[in-house]
Image: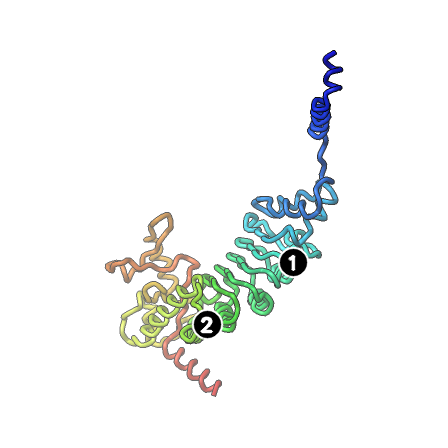
Amino acid sequence: MMEMEDDDDPCAASLLTYARFIRRKSTAKVTLDDINEDTLHSILSRVDVESPRELLALSVVSKRFRDALRSSTVWHTLDLKAHGAQMTNKILYGIIKDDDAFASIETLRLAGCVQLTDLSVIKVLNKCRRTVREIDLTGCELLTVETARFIAANCKKVERLYFTNCKRVPTTYVLKSIIQSASSPLVDVRINGTKHLNGRVDEYDFEELLVVIKEYVDWLHSFDGTMFEQGDVDDCVDVALTCEKHLQKWRAAVGENLVTLCNHASDLQDNVERRKDRVCTLFPDCGHVQCVECQDKERRNMFRNNGAYVYPCPGCLNRSPLRCMPAPGGFEIAVHAPEAFRRRQAERRDARA
């Protein structure tokens, strides 16, 4: 009797129909086919992963996923720093392949990928050269001037460029590129640890850096645009100019033991050209000069400071603040006899004339 009344009631019948509709919808299965391409690309582009390889692993889900993951609309950043030392040219080739999946990335981070060479890095840069704005190559020790040259010639939208500890990339070339890029959007460059500021640098090579630095300083003073952040460039310039003052003191103090810390350095300062096995280096921090053999003995007096080993300069022990020798493998300048240096400089001036 009750059911008859419900069937006769239009309102009850409408509610019953709606309830059946909701029940059907709540039990319906939603598949990937219900997601259109644009939505799928948008979802994949927002997946937060530590490595792009984790996202690329979704290619096994289906052919549709595989195709979607090779779309340039999915990739805006390629960050491989989590793989560091494990990343090789072969693995990078397998990631970028020969399609345009990474043709629209704006951020490329390869920091710590010590096995990558110019070939693979230039290949990925060639794909994104029109869009990339940040390039982080920190610690890519095998890269050379070829990568720097490609970036300068092709990546015109780069705003941030990090060459920190790329010890084969010439510091001089990067600085020249900055000077020539006054109209580019470049705002942040890092060059600490590049070729002319890394390890043992010959005095003659360091003089080439000083020439370019003076060009850079002159250019900076004449720069009429908005002042830009320059990463660590200014700090590196300050270090180089300080070393220039130390070198001038070394060359001018002939016959006076003002900056030398051992007899071998004193002999070299008195224009007794060094033996090939007796290298003397200048400490950038304080300007003292000592042969490498005597340095090795003095480094036994090292101690830990803020979690790192420091090597006090034996000529600065009574000074405040304490000045230190470079750590093993750190930046230092291999000096020549002052007279030999002046002779070579005169020869180079005559050659240019």
Residue ID for mark 2? 205
Callout in the foreground (2, 1): 1
* Residue at the top extreme, as displayed: 1
Answer left or right for 59 relative to 266. right
Answer left or right for 15 relative to 85. right
Q: Tags 2 and 1 in contact by the CB under 8 Å rule?
A: no
Which of the 4 image quarters holds residue 343?
bottom left
Q: Nearer the viewer, residue 82 or 88?
A: 82
First-in-chain label (2 vs 1): 1
Answer left or right for 72 relative to 272. right
Residue 47 in percent (x, y) is at: 60, 44
The tag on residue 103 is 1
Q: Mark 2: which amino acid?
A: Asp
What kind of element bears circle 2?
Answer: helix
Which of the 4 image quarters holds residue 324?
bottom left
Q: Could you tell me which quadrant the N terminus lies in?
A: top right
